[in-house]
Image (cartoon, grey):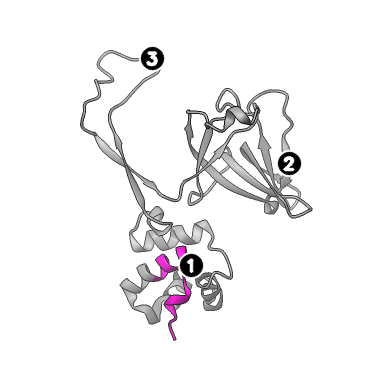
Amino acid sequence: MVRRKEYSGLSRRIFDAVAEQVGPRQVQAVLARKISLPRAAISARLRGETSWKAEEVETVAEWLGFPVGALYGGILRVPVMGAVAANPTPGLVREAGDEPEEYLEVPQCLRAFTVYDTSMTPLARPGQRVLVDPTIQVVSGDLVVARVVEGDGENTWMFKRYERQKVGKGWKALLQSIAPGFQTVVLPEYAVKLWKVVGLWLMPSPRWQGMR
């Protein structure tokens, strides 16, 4: 029996999109084949008992022919008004007009974090915000926001450059600062959740004046 009303958020959007292609009664079977998981695991994800992994959502989106951001809650179209260069070359960059040249499709699932310290200067300064996209697979060398669960169950969030390093039979996550004088954080890869940084909001948070 299909109980669509039990599903919400990401699971509801995945269920509806797949059901439109194959019918509601075939959703779990199709997802199990496409993602290579048992049907019980698919059922647990749809009911919210287990979280969807980013690569699983990407696989479903690719099969459906959807932008992956659409499954996470929609797409925001941002107009591109022209091109800029740090060292302009005559004839290379034309003047931007009033009409957009194109649109960027930005997933509405983007999240922002306020930078609190100077460990990533000059890239990002205290009070500025970094934008992350939780739908993008992180690779070694990326700028990330990392969530580390401490022994007391509390979350610690860090803005760092991520490097993946083989240590013995396992992998370590190296969380590095850009500014000198800050220690690299080394943790087992399974102990860290990583979100890829995709942008920087230069305008400082209005709350920042009271934080310093």
Residue 142 visible in the current orientation = no
* Front position in the image: 192 or 147: 147
Type of the residue with mark 2 = Val
Residue 12 is a magenta residue: yes
* Front position in the image: 144 or 62: 144
Label 1: which secondary element: helix
* Front position in the image: 11 or 210: 210
Could you give the CA–CA distance between mark 2 and mark 3, rounded to whole angstroms? 38 Å
> How far across and how far down the image is residue 163, in percent?
63, 39
Disc assigned to residue 186: 2
Q: Nearer the viewer, mark 1 or mark 3?
A: 3
Is 64 drawn above or below residue 88 in the view shown? below
Quarter of the figure with residue 26: bottom left
Q: Which residues are magenta?
A: 1-15
Q: Where is mark 1, residue-wise?
A: 35
- Circles 2 and 3: CB distance less than 8 Å? no
Label 3: which secondary element: loop
Label 2: which secondary element: strand
Could you give the CA–CA distance between mark 1 and mark 2, rounded to whole angstroms? 31 Å
What is the chief secondary structure element of the magenta stretch? helix
Could you give the CA–CA distance between mark 1 and mark 3, rounded to whole angstroms? 46 Å
Q: Earlier in the sequence, mark 1 or mark 2?
A: 1
Q: Earlier in the sequence, mark 2 or mark 3?
A: 3
Type of the residue with mark 1 = Ile
> How far across and how far down the image is residue 127, in percent?
57, 30
Q: Nearer the viewer, mark 1 or mark 2?
A: 2
Q: Where is mark 3, residue-wise?
A: 87
